[in-house]
Structures are given as structure tokens and as C-alpha cells.
């Protein structure tokens, strides 16, 4: 398939009795260009449409969503382009289970090790980069907030509702009391990460807080904006508070939050996540596209 051949087909294609618009044609061509580049990088060979499989398109979907992390609208545009391609090939079964994304569906996203490392480096540097006293105070506040999502799995609404007395910090342990979690549930969560305890203690000391006063005194929107801004500075575009919680759960099940590096059972992670159903927890910790590639990386040599 050449771009010229396919473009000619698209430009003469009718949908609901009308020719495809130039914008739609351009979008479909762009989708195939992205597919070609992905195919070459993944299989080390050029795309031959006659050999395209359903697995290829399912893998392309997983890569688009889990690695590129495209928005639902972007994926659905790509999917329309793939459907046009499969129609041209003459095999609609290639699109089996290559589902659209509901824009309202929460995409489960977590940071990979490189992104996690960049964010941690940025958080450590924040106070050092502050120019004014206000910036310094805000940097301590923001990284303390982020630490509760990244190392205890709190939701942003739970973080901004905390009071100073809801957090207990000891030399070798700590805990957080969530009085009104999702479903108005009361929970007590461990805070074992020493970095998180240090950052929270530094914020409390610098702000002169004590007793039953608000720990952060900001809205959920402000907290979310801080997460996104700091993520962008760390090279993690579009980072959200949900992503921090998801990263906590994923790293916990993978053993990256454990002192001994051992993986943690789903039942334990379910309790830490405060999920009522194990199926919900599974969505947060399923293998990423990179992990699936690593798992079968040695098959070629065998």
C-alpha cells in the first residue's frame, strides 16, 4: 500500500451518501502513518497490509492508550482510521475487540520507572529552586500533598480534607487517618515511606501547624493544579492526582514499595486501595504494554 493509492481510495469513498471530507481523509492518513511507524519499531519490519492481524491492531490499541496515553477522543479518531483501512483491505474481522474508548471512562495510568524518577528528582529540588519565601512554603506544601498520594494512595479529595491530627509520624513508622473516604468510609492507612514522613514533617514544621487545623488549607482543584504543574516541570505531561494513586498501587503490587522488594498480594493491595471488589484492584495493576513486551522478549531467541 502506498499513501497515494490509499489517499485516492479515501478521496473517492462515500459515507452516508457523501464523500469523506478532506479533514477526515487527512486524519485517516495520519493514523496509518502512526501505525506504520509503530509497526516498524515493534516488529523491525515494514507494514504489509496483507499480513496485518487482529493481534497487531489490539497491540496498537494497547500501545496508544498505555504508552502514548492518548485521550479517548484521540484514540477514537485513530480507530475510525483503522476501520477505514480494514474496509479497504476487505477484512472487518481485523477490528474484533478493538474497542472505542468512552470519554467518561477513567483511564488507568501509572508512571513508569523513568517518569517516577524524574518526578522524585523534581520534588527534591523544589525547595532549592524557590526564589521567594512564598515559593519555598508552597514547594514544601505541594510535595507533602503529593507524597500522601504517591506513598499512601490517598485520593486528592481525601488529602485536602486532612487535619494535622489525622497524620501520625514516628521515627520508623507513620499512619494517616481518613475520616471520610469514598463512600464516607473511615480508614487508617500506613505511612511507612521515610521520604513521605520527612516531607510531611517539614511542611508541618515550616507552616507552624498543630492540633485539629487543616493540614494544607487548599481546594482539590488547587491540589490537582499543583500536581499537573510539577509533573509538567518533571517531563510527565498531563500528570493527575489519580495517576499518583494508581502509581502507588502498581508499585506496591510490583514490590517497588516494599522494604524487601517482594511483590504484594492482590488481597493486601485491595485493602490498601480500599476497594470493595478485587476486580477493581486488578484494573489498577494489570501489566503494562512495556511489561508484556519484556515478558516475551526472549521468545525470538528460543
Image: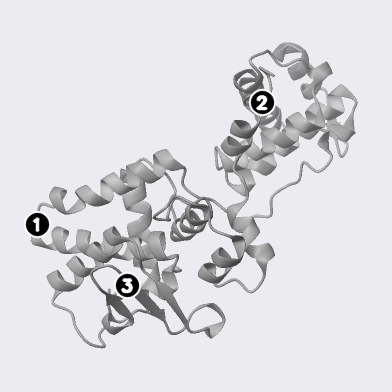
Mark 1 lies on residue = 132
Q: Which image quarter is the N terminus in?
A: top right
Q: Are marks 3 and 1 in contact (CB under 8 Å)?
A: no
Q: Which structural element holds mark 3?
A: strand
In the displayed structure image, the side of residue 177 where residue 214 appears, left or right: left
Q: Is residue 104 visible?
A: no
**151 versus 94 height, above or below:** below
Q: Position of residue 57 (x, y in %)?
A: 74, 32
At 69% from the left and 50% from the top, the residue drawn is 101
Q: Are marks 2 and 3 in contact (CB under 8 Å)?
A: no
Q: Earlier in the sequence, mark 3 or mark 1?
A: 1
At 55% from the left and 72% from the top, the residue drawn is 274
Q: Which structural element holds mark 2?
A: helix
Q: Nearer the viewer, mark 2 or mark 3?
A: 3
Dividing the picture into quadrants, the one containing residue 148 is bottom left
At 53% from the left and 68% from the top, the residue drawn is 273
**69 versus 35 height, above or below:** below
Query: How many marks do you count on the picture?
Result: 3
Q: Earlier in the sequence, mark 2 or mark 3?
A: 2
Residue 174's disc number: 3
Q: Nearer the viewer, mark 3 or mark 1?
A: 3
Q: Position of residue 97 (x, y in %)?
A: 81, 43
Mark 2 lies on residue = 35
Q: Position of residue 128 (x, y in %)?
A: 14, 49
Amino acid at each position: 500500500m502506498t499513501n497515494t493509492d490509499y489517499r485516492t481510495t479515501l478521496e473517492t469513498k462515500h459515507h452516508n451518501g457523501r464523500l469523506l471530507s478532506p479533514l477526515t481523509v487527512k486524519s485517516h492518513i495520519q493514523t496509518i502513518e502512526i501505525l506504520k511507524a509503530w509497526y516498524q519499531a515493534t516488529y523491525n519490519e515494514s507494514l504489509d497490509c496483507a499480513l496485518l492481524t487482529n493481534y497487531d491492531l489490539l497491540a496498537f490499541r494497547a500501545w496508544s492508550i498505555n504508552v502514548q496515553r492518548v485521550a479517548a477522543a484521540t484514540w477514537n479518531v485513530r480507530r475510525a482510521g483503522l476501520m477505514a483501512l480494514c474496509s479497504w483491505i476487505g477484512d472487518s474481522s481485523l477490528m474484533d475487540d478493538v474497542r472505542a474508548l468512552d470519554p467518561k471512562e477513567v483511564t488507568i495510568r501509572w508512571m513508569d520507572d523513568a517518569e517516577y524518577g524524574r518526578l522524585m528528582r523534581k520534588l527534591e529540588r523544589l525547595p532549592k529552586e524557590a526564589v521567594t519565601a512564598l515559593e519555598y512554603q508552597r514547594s514544601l506544601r505541594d510535595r507533602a500533598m503529593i507524597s500522601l498520594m504517591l506513598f499512601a494512595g490517598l485520593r486528592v479529595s481525601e488529602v485536602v480534607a486532612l487535619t494535622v491530627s489525622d497524620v501520625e509520624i514516628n521515627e520508623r513508622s507513620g499512619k494517616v487517618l481518613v475520616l471520610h473516604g469514598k463512600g464516607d468510609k473511615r480508614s487508617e492507612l500506613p505511612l511507612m515511606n521515610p521520604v513521605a514522613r520527612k516531607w510531611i514533617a517539614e511542611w508541618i514544621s515550616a507552616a507552624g501547624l498543630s492540633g485539629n487545623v487543616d493540614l494544607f488549607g487548599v481546594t482539590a482543584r488547587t491540589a490537582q493544579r499543583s500536581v499537573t504543574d510539577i509533573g509538567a516541570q518533571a517531563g510527565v505531561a498531563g500528570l493527575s492526582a489519580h495517576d499518583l494513586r494508581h502509581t502507588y498501587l502498581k508499585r506496591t503490587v510490583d514490590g517497588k514499595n516494599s522494604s524487601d522488594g517482594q511483590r504484594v498480594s492482590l488481597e493486601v493491595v485491595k485493602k490498601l486501595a480500599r476497594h470493595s471488589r478485587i476486580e477493581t484492584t486488578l484494573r489498577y495493576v494489570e501489566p503494562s504494554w512495556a511489561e508484556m513486551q519484556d515478558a516475551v522478549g526472549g521468545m525470538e531467541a528460543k
